[in-house]
Image (tube, helix red, strand yellow):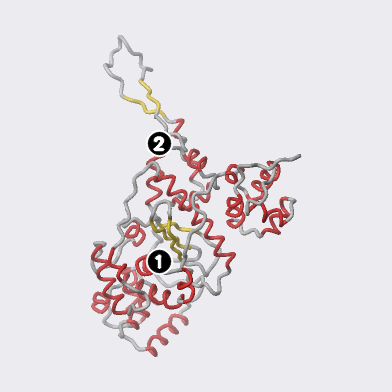
Amino acid sequence: MRVGVERFEGIRLRQARMSKGHRMNALSKLVGVSSQAIGQYERNEHKPTMDVVARLADELEFEPDFLMTPVKQSDVGLVFWRDRRSESKFAREQTEQRMLWALEVFELLEGYAEFHTDALPEVGFSYDYRFTTNDDLERLVVQVREEMGLGLGPIPNMTMALENVGIPVVLLDVPSDKQDGFQWFSDISDRHFIGINTKNSTGCRVRFDLAHEFAHILLHRAVEKSDAVANHKLLEQQANYFAGAFLFPAERFMEDVTVPSIDYFLSLKRKWGVSVTGMIERAFSLGMIDKFQRTDLHRSCGRRKWRGYGRSEPMDEDIPIKTPKLMRKAFELLVNEGVISAEGLRGALPIPASEFEAIIGLPKDSFNQFASAFDKVRILPVRNLSSATLTKHSAEVVPFGRRENG
């Protein structure tokens, strides 16, 4: 009688399958089992044999150990998808698996490094989204900027501004033009995370997406999932308004924009890091242009081929997408100091190296280049140097201590 692997974790199979974009029937054909069996494995109704585990891992390009690694958090909770109606549930779940891994990677690093505690501005908690007006959002922006020490000027690095208040940022290359940004909450670390889809995006767009997700955290964290679905349009409108106001405060915008024209907006783009189309919307929200002028300006952008998926505005290349540093710095410090190795980290969560790179913010194909902490030694200066007692080859070598990964 062939016995299944008791340690097998069905949810890990689902995570690996979804991350690769496989449906159950497609994976079943690759592995040589029925789609019904795949479902039973994922629901932990049956345990696959070691032979099947090996075939599953091989087809999904994961280590077999991953399919036997206990899960810390199985649900990302409420996610404010920008375009919920047109994006498929399958596509959203595909991204949610990477969100869960980001939580686990952060928790692993947090076991060795002390991160900045949650320092979110408190002013957002008194706002009830059902009664929040645009004037409320304008006041909120000023308060939040003041509390974060940002003043009313341009924000040089929106990613760093969020990481400085304890929000880890993750950049992902998601094959969907309907997933711009998303935020989720970690029960393990008791903090919010923000993810951004960088595929075909620009620095200006990423900055706006970050501000948009920040608005959801400040304004909508207490919203129930059923209310979020029912009031999706209102919540997105509020987040969009907050993002525009946060990136370009009203007082400074009205000082800087003397002529609300495309060429004038373009002259301010590099300074503020806000797109021309974003400035058109900001001018309209502040009553500087009417709806007819707004339409004409957007049409003019269209004629110049600045609008549409995959298109870009002038100077987009001058405003780079800022790479997150919070988790990357912790990882590099721990590895370089010999506290834990890159291999040790993957041993605790055996996801592909490419997934670690995306989550931590490392350059592509760089994860495996980090030397193992177990191979490092610290060479100390020789004490009491004397030709009578030491040869030219002498040295005192003290190995790094290592912390076992639990």
Residue 350, quarter of picture: top right
Name the residue carrying label 2: 339
Q: Earlier in the sequence, mark 1 or mark 2?
A: 1
Which residue reaches farthest right? 1
Q: Is residue 265 above or below residue 53?
A: below
Name the residue carrying label 1: 213
Q: Residues within 10 Å of mark 2 (few under 14, many from 20)?
A: many
Camera-side residue of 86 and 355? 86
Residue 147: give its label.
none
Residue 144: x and y, percent? Answer: 27, 67
Residue 314, quarter of picture: bottom left
Which residue reaches farthest bottom? 292
SS at badge 2:
loop
Q: In percent of the image, x 24 and y 74: which residue is there?
A: 252
Q: Amino acid at mark 2?
A: Val
Residue 202: x and y, percent? Answer: 44, 66
Q: In percent of the image, x 43 and y 49: which residue is there?
A: 106
Residue 171: x and y, percent? Answer: 45, 58
Camera-side residue of 320 and 60? 60
Camera-side residue of 58 and 15? 15
Q: Residues within 10 Å of mark 1 (few under 14, many from 20)?
A: many
Whether residue 257 sits left or right of residue 208 in the image: it is left
